[in-house]
Amino acid sequence: MAPRHLLTLLDLTPAELDNLLDHAIQLKRELRSGTVRDTLHNRVLAMIFEKSSTRTRVSFEAGMIQLGGSALFLSPRDTQLGRGEPIEDSARVISSMADAVMIRTFEHQKVDTFSHFSKSPVINALTDDYHPCQLLADMQTWREHRGAAKGIRVAWIGDGNNMCNSYINAARQFDFELVVACPEGYEPNADLVSANQDRVSIVNDPKAAAEGAHLIVTDVWASMGQEEEQQARTNDFAGFQVNPDLMKLADKDALFMHCLPAHRGEEVSVDMLDHPASVVWDEAENRLHAQKALLEFLILGF
Ligand code: CP
Ligand code: NVA
């Protein structure tokens, strides 16, 4: 049977995503109560990192260990992938030895190609276009704090980047409204926006997006791979900071999320991560629980 993958949130049905989040919450409870779980005993996760990471690496590696398996960290510096061995060949070889493969890279096309030649499930751990694993954690966090996301209004403030594109997919899969506030020229993927115009809108004024929002989310102005644009982006994104004044426009019970790492003083004010509405630390921790649920789903089918 062909393996299932998670390249974008659309690879799982809304019902599967729902079950996965319930399962993640259950795994978190079990871990906290000291229950030992070894469902992935002897299983191996290969982790290919072509970009830096703290949360993604630690959560996948710790998650595999906690489930009785192990994880291999593969960097392009030490593997033949970095010396130009074709993705197709690498996919055949790595997936013949690993039970799942996690990839963080630049072009989304690479994870697509890898998955076509892989015998094992492939997990997108961030590409230039999407970051679905982060959305699993964000949606788990929303569920724990506020319940179902259906019908809420989410405001995305900032760059129309990989996280923003994934929020558009999440709006579809979890049935909420998304208002994106970005400077002109920094809109999310146009095809994705037009395919979801019943629930996604774009404005250029952060205040208009924040008005009445139940959840406010942002991310860095310059993503990995855009370091040389940092100065130009700092100018272009002036006024797109999430801070306590912007939060005042949101619903009184609104939450604030950021996938981290954050640049205090840029996309968030210095005090925003510690604001009463901020759930960023729960959000970061939930990467662990959500991905353990994902690994069990993809490798074991539950
Ligand atoms: N949020 C996130 O993916 O963090 P890392 O880059 O540290 O993995
Ligand atoms: N948009 C950011 C997310 C980091 C987790 C980046 O791609 O660098």
Image (cartoon, helix red, strand yellow):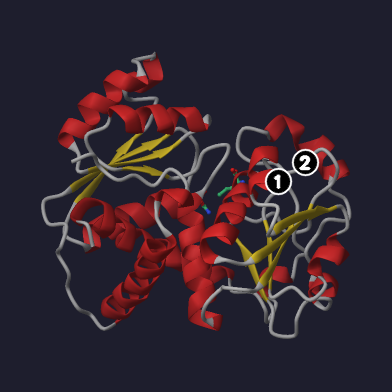
Q: Choose the circle earlier in sequence order: 1 or 2.
A: 1
The answer to whether residue 297 is left or right of residue 283 is left
Q: Residue at x 88, y 50 (%)?
A: 238
Residue 92: image location, x then y, percent? 23, 25
Q: Secondary structure at mark 1?
A: loop
Q: Which image quarter is the N terminus in? A: top left
Mark 2: amino acid: Tyr
On the image, numbered disc 1 is attached to which residue? Answer: 160
| Label 2, residues with CA under 10 Å away: few <14, some 14-19, many ≥20 | some
Q: Residue at x 77, y 41 (%)?
A: 186
| Label 1, residues with CA under 10 Å away: few <14, some 14-19, many ≥20 | many
Verify CB contact (< 8 Å) between mark 1 and mark 2.
yes
Residue 31 in view: yes
Q: Which image quarter is the C terminus in? A: bottom left
On the image, numbered disc 2 is attached to which residue? Answer: 186
Residue 282: image location, x then y, percent? 50, 72
Gap in Å between the C-alphas at discs 1 and 2? 5 Å
